[in-house]
Image: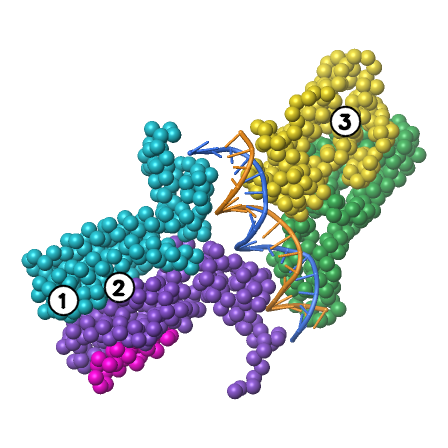
Chain colours: A green, B yellow, C cyan, D purple, E orange, F blue
DNA sequence: GATGAATGAGAGTTCATTCAT
DNA sequence: TATGAATGAACTCTCATTCAT
């Protein structure tokens, strides 16, 4: 189902295309099989290149893994930040929080997000720097951005006075904590309605605790 | 100091001792290396037995993995349930909740708990049944037990009327959610003081939302 | 389908029964799997004993193999000799030869005979002495016995003067040679009618060449 | 003495050379040890390549075995057919038949022929398709070719009227049957003189039975 | 720059054989 | 004597990685 680029004979584009194809294939295979089990040969095949080409581009399997993970973490960060930015102080607070909560859960429950978290857990032992790669690009910065928005809500008198960092932590926890069980660690597709329920419940508790 | 023969030289206990030794070594090695990378030979060496002995006892690597995980999940369940049972309705509620919260965080942040969760995430792809093995023995049943206790607190008028299942989910989320970031996925040892802080903050938010 | 001896608790019979059971099971397993692939554990299970019992009786796998083969070779020799003894000089020669030829082919095409020959070929490299074990007990002595009978036929004027050893060799060759192809090396069950045809054709050629 | 580059250092021929080397080594080792006992590592060493190279070329041990056997069967077929083609109807029949018989016995008693037959018998259980691989390439087609020649001799009036297929079967049987015993299944080197004797005796019997 | 071919190291698994009971 | 348990050695097969083109 891949679309073959018909114009990549040794052009500069061709090289970039191949690099992207390899990264994409790598993430797919790593997700499916885990790092140790994933075969470079399989990745190469799925990317439509020869095995040594992978090595020409990335040097070794570990580097390929790191870069593939980093690329996906970037993507996830961007999506999450875009959601947090929707948290504005105009109008009724509850529906806004519920909408943001729902969107964040959508990100959290995205197939690729589960894959990323799974790989992170799986390979922390062999790749301790993965924490920084992923968290520097995703989880922490999202919480930070969320804290910023909450701080402004406090200043605007829409929330009671509190530590916005802690509040952001807890808001996130109230959203994602219940999902882990319900999504069975990403193996069950959670319907949007359930996402909205969880978001509503989280927001309810959050507002009971943090409304002025 | 009992003086029974604890040396395992060929007594009837020998078999059981070896089984336990293998399970223990297996968990250590799986934790260190991940399932795919862990070598049965290494496990055998670490257990002080020969490689075929491992196969005599467990048949193959997958079974060994499942049984090792199940054993650790059992242990974790027991510890968690013991903590939840301490949640009694006598006296002031806040300090009791804070103590239970702290103890639950101790369990959650235990080295072996992190290992278990990491392996669970890591190998879900290859072992989908791991969810049931672990959750049937741990996470879910703890939340259930917690919900039971919260229900009694509602009936006793110590908490406002609410769905105890949801309340338990959120209490757990408020505890563990913030830990994931702070413990850097288990790679950082979190001092008890910080655990108590997180517990206090979680209980504060929880009581603001669920006090009558 | 084995009949278990109900009275073998440590009696002298019990021991012999077990020995026979092991030999029988061994031959079956060796036939099915070949020497190298056959597992002593499987043989033991099929004989209804524990693995070390096999070693108590036979010392090692090679000895077990030799004894099992020797036992079957004995059985084959007896059957063949009984057939050759039917070769009497009274009455018409052709039908007698045809009957003997047919009976010899029956022996030759017996499942257990094919197994024996296959094992012999298979393991000649590892067991050079197998030639003597089997041939001393079977092929050669049958040809010798046949030569004896033919010699008496020559003396009785029923066959032309010739070397009876050569005649016996050739009579056997005319019988068995065509079978190898037709029986597809023992993997095809040859119907009796075809056996009789081959025997008749062999006798016809033999008599054309050796009638006085 | 041709002066082409027969050294195989990385030329395009290199691949083919290695393939041939592996096939040759495989046949030698399989012959020496039997299929089950033969180690791929040994084969690789004897071929002067690394173990995975064997797997790159043949995929697995079974395929390697089949291809090695097929290659040798091809070789044997060619030699046998060349001999049968020498069976012409000009001149005296007896010496021609004796020469052909002798040459066929040479083929039959060739070391590699014994090896092939031994392996065929030995591994029929595990490789039932070996019958077709070998017989389609060797035994059957030789008998067929021989039958063709005998048919022409019948038409030319040099042999009596008969079924040429049967006659070919019996001619072959008269040649090879006595060899099995004399060569002790290929473990004894039979001198040419004895081969000629057996051939002469076979031809004598054959002509007595089939001369017009 | 991209590839087909080759490899060293190591994986899981099996098995004949031997203790200790 | 018969056995459950343990083991050392060996097996097939895989894989990340590197030449030579």
Local SS, label 1: helix
Disc 1 versus disc 2: distance between alpha carbons? 17 Å
Q: Nearer the viewer, residue A150 or B156?
A: B156
Percent across and percent down for residue B56 are 55, 39
Q: Quadrant of residue D87?
A: bottom left
Percent across and percent down for residue D177 are 27, 65
Q: Chain of mark 3?
A: B
**Labels 1 and 2 in the same subunit:** yes
Count of numbered labels shown in the rendering:
3
| Whether residue E7 is situated above or below residue C81 in the rendered picture | below
* CA neighbours of label 1 inside 10 A, class few (<14), some (14 to 19), many (20+): many
For residue C177, the mark is 2
- Please state, as top left, top right, bottom left or bottom right, where the N terminus of chain C lies in the image: top left
* CA neighbours of label 2 inside 10 A, class few (<14), some (14 to 19), many (20+): many
| Whether residue D105 is situated above or below residue A17 in the rendered picture | below
**Residue C173 lies within the magenta run:** no
- Please state, as top left, top right, bottom left or bottom right, where the C terminus of chain C lies in the image: bottom left
**Residue D99 lies within the magenta run:** yes
| Range drawn in magenta | D77-102
Name the residue at 27% across, 59% down: C140
| Whether residue D77 is situated above or below residue A97 in the rendered picture | below
Q: Chain of mark 2?
A: C
> What residue would you read off at disc 1?
C207
| Whether residue D179 is situated above or below residue A96 in the rendered picture | below
Local SS, label 2: helix
For residue D11, the mark is none
Name the residue at 12% across, 69% down: C160
> What residue would you read off at disc 3?
B104
Q: Quadrant of residue D160?
A: bottom left
Percent across and percent down for residue C121 are 37, 58
Percent across and percent down for residue B58 are 57, 38
């Amino acid at each position: 189902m891949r679309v073959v680029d018909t114009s990549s004979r040794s052009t500069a584009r061709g090289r970039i295309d191949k690099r992207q194809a390899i990264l994409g294939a790598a993430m797919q295979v790593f997700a499916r099989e885990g790092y140790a089990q994933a075969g470079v040969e399989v990745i190469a095949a799925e990317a439509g290149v020869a095995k040594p080409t992978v090595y020409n581009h990335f040097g070794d399997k570990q580097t390929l893994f790191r870069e593939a993970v980093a690329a996906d973490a970037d993507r996830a960060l961007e999506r999450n930040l875009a959601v947090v930015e929707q948290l504005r102080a105009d109008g009724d607070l509850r529906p806004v929080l519920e909408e943001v909560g729902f969107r964040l859960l959508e990100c959290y429950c995205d197939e690729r997000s589960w894959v990323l978290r799974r790989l992170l857990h799986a390979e922390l032992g062999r790749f301790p720097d993965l924490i920084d790669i992923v968290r520097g690009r995703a989880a922490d910065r999202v919480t930070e951005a969320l804290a910023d928005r909450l701080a402004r809500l406090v200043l605007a008198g829409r929330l009671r006075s509190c530590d916005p960092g802690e509040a952001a932590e807890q808001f996130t926890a109230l959203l994602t904590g219940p999902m882990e069980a319900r999504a069975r660690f990403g193996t069950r597709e959670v319907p949007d309605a359930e996402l909205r329920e969880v978001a509503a419940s989280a927001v309810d508790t959050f507002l009971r605790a943090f409304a002025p």
